[in-house]
Image (cartoon, coloured by chain):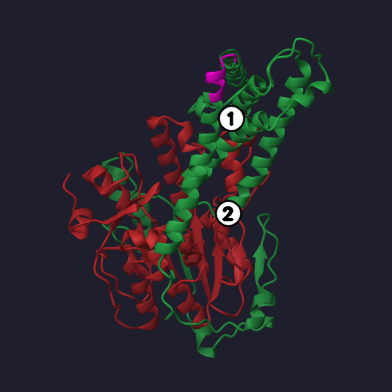
Chain colours: A red, B green
Amino acid sequence: MLSLSSLFEMDYVATAPADVSDGLLRYRSLLEGDSQFVRAMRAQGYQHVYAHPGAFDWLGCDPTLADVCIEPRTDSLRLSEVDRTIAEMTPLQLLTSQTLLPYTDPVYVADQARQARTDAPQLVVGHILSPHGPYRYTDSCALRETFVEAAALDADGRKAAYLQDVICTDALTLQAVRSIVLRDPDAVIVVLSDHGSNFEIEGPTQAAWTEAGIVERFGVLDAVRAPGCDLPEERGVLVNLLRRVQACLDGTEPDLLPDRAFTWWEENPLGLEELPDAAARLQHPQR
Amino acid sequence: MPDANPPSTTARRGPARLRQLRPTPVLVVLACATAPLAGFVYDNRYDLPDVAAVTPWWFATVAFGLVLLAGLTMATRRASVDALALVAGVVVASFYQFGRFSGAASPDVASLVRFAAIVGLVAFAVFRLATVPTARRFVGLLAVMLAVVPLFGYAAWRVSATAQAPPTARPSTAPTPTVDPAAADADVRLDGDGADADAADLASAGVAVAEDVAARPDVYVFVLDERARGDELAGRLGLDTSAFEAELTELGFSVAPVSFAE
């Protein structure tokens, strides 16, 4: 959450424990559109189209921050995250495990955005939950009958399910990108991830993280299609990515922030701590 | 603490037994119904958007516990109501432990039956234990503590966090969008069934679009949550995604090989 907040805010939103002392929910509006990047784009006349992942109570679509809200697909009873989580503590999970979480994919988001098109240029932000669990795709990339929670799998099963979802989400991303490029060769397209996987053991403090776990968790997908712009291959920290895109759109030089990274743990956000020598350790890891 | 509800040698089954319900057994059931949900609230304090979302579960659990206590009380003649309250408390508190019991396994009816059998045994053991007044008081006090401690913990965190919180999440220098206030009425929601969006609503309701803006390119940002970097997928997890990256490159993308999150 902090990673995405910083991405859209184009700045480091949390650099000290005090920044997260009252929890992380204060940053949700940054994801929903009240960020430097989205505000600047809307100020330039862009229509903000936002597709939220659908799985979290704290993250939805605020109609005051988005011109168009793309609601996720749902094929069954829609439960709130709190209701679903509590139900899974009880025997009611026999019923709730048969329902699907709302879901989106890049093809769906691109199609829905196209239907909402006006004369204004579009800024389409699609937060796709996959390949994050619960895992949703079969070997043939069809939707599973019921999504599988990571906690319901052993280590090998979780890894296999995660990788299958990577394969299928990559394929759907390519399908969406191809259709966008075919229709609109000038489109700027950013495909990224907010963080990597976490099969290495992590802990509630930075000291408990292994070096391999840090690289695995912080390494991200970063692919940008910006016709007419020359982007460096080594772009470093994600917080500068949309600064580069914005500068590209404006025809200016990007004003970049220094590379920094911070470890924190969902159950212990107050353990937030800066990662020393982040760029060296994360860009050229010792294997 | 004297035994408020000693077993009666002359009592009968039925509604008349409900007169033996005193505040203490009701409090025990209340505590046992509250404890697991209080723990849930405390454990999820950093990302629970609204504590009120838990209250329907709490009301339902308390109601279930009290109905169960009333039912047990009416169905028995000699059993101490305090002991029955502990039995009802064990049942309602256990209700929220099924997830731990089933663990990684996919839940099924058989696991529910096994779980019910274990809860029954525990409830019986607690019932027997409750014949000893000291043990009964200890278990009752424990239930109250399990309910109260996380609630106090949550309240203390709330007060402390509010006092320490920075004033705003976003610098106040952020630019203001040029969307007309009337545009709030024009917001379009697309539902999951793919209903057509009335895109014209936006334009007709006054979204200000500068003339030179129309020439700007569309911008798409796709966030793939938790998608690992290519070198990590290949080196650590054994998945070669180079074909994906090559196709992106063919489509005009610049794929950064070693980017990292902040």
Horizontal side of residue B11 vs B31, given as left or right = right
- The reply to whether label 1 and label 2 mark residues of one chain is yes
Can you name the residue that lies furthest to the right here? B15
Q: What chain is tagged by disc 1?
A: B
Q: Which quadrant of the rendered structure holds the C terminus of chain B?
A: bottom left
Q: Which type of secondary structure does the marked residue at label 1 adopt?
A: helix
Identify which residue is drawn at 17% across, 44% down: A287
Q: Which quadrant of the rendered structure holds the N terminus of chain B?
A: top right
Residue B111 can be seen, yes or no: yes
Q: How many marks?
A: 2
Query: In front: B38, or B85?
Result: B85
- Residue A230 among magenta residues: no
- Give x and y (percent) for residue B188: 66, 69
What residue is pinned by disc 2?
B50
- Residue B132 among magenta residues: yes
Horizontal side of residue B119 vs A258, given as left or right = right
Relative to B64, residue B78 above or below: above
Query: In front: B242, or A231?
Result: A231
Q: Mainly helix, strand or loop, the magenta region?
A: helix
Dot 2: within a 10 Å radius of its alpha carbon, few (fewer than 14), some, or many (20 or more) residues?
few
